[in-house]
Image: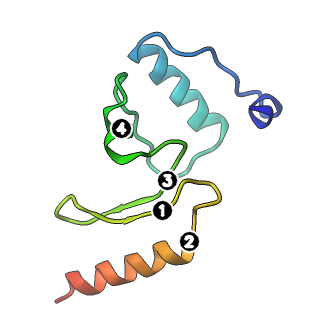
Amino acid sequence: MESNIKENIVFASPKNEGERALIAGACVRKLAIKFPAVLDEFGDSTEKAYTGWPDRLYLIDSQGRIAYKSEAGPFGFKPDQLATALLHLTAQTKH
C-alpha cells in the first residue's frame, strides 16, 4: 500500500462493476501498462478459478488450456520460465 501512496494510486473499494472499471482504467493509465488488461466481474469468478491474486502470469494455449502458470508475483515472475513455455508451445503448434 505504501508504494500505491507514493504513486498516488489510492482508491476506496469499488461498490459496483462500473466503479471497478473506472478504477482499473485509472490504474492502467497511471501505471502505463502496455499489455492487454482484463477486468474480472464483480464476483471475482476468474480470480477464484485461476488463483490470480495478487497477480500471476498465465500462458493460454490455442485450445484455451493453461500452458504455463507463474507463482504469485511479483517475486514469482520468472521470465525465463515463461519464455521456455512459449518456445515449447510454439514448437508444438508447428508440428
Which residue type carries mark 1?
Ser
Residue linked to disc 1: 70
Which residue type carries mark 2?
Pro
Label 3 – label 1 distance at C-alpha:
6 Å
18 to 88, vertically: above or below: above
Viewer-side label of 2, 1: 1
In terms of sequence position, does the residue under pointer 4 or pointer 1 come before the other?
4
Which residue type carries mark 4?
Lys
Do tag 3 and tag 1 residues touch (Cβ < 8 Å)?
yes
Residue linked to disc 2: 79
Residue linked to disc 3: 56
10 Å neighbourhood of mark 1: few (<14), some, or many (≥20)? some
Query: Is 42 placed left or right of 30 in the picture?
Result: left
Secondary structure category for the residue under label 3 = loop
Q: Position of residue 54 (x, y in %)?
A: 55, 43
In terms of sequence position, does the residue under pointer 4 or pointer 2 come before the other?
4
Viewer-side label of 3, 2: 3
82 to 39, vertically: above or below: below
Residue linked to disc 4: 48
Q: As rendered, which of 51 and 81 lies closer to the eye?
A: 51
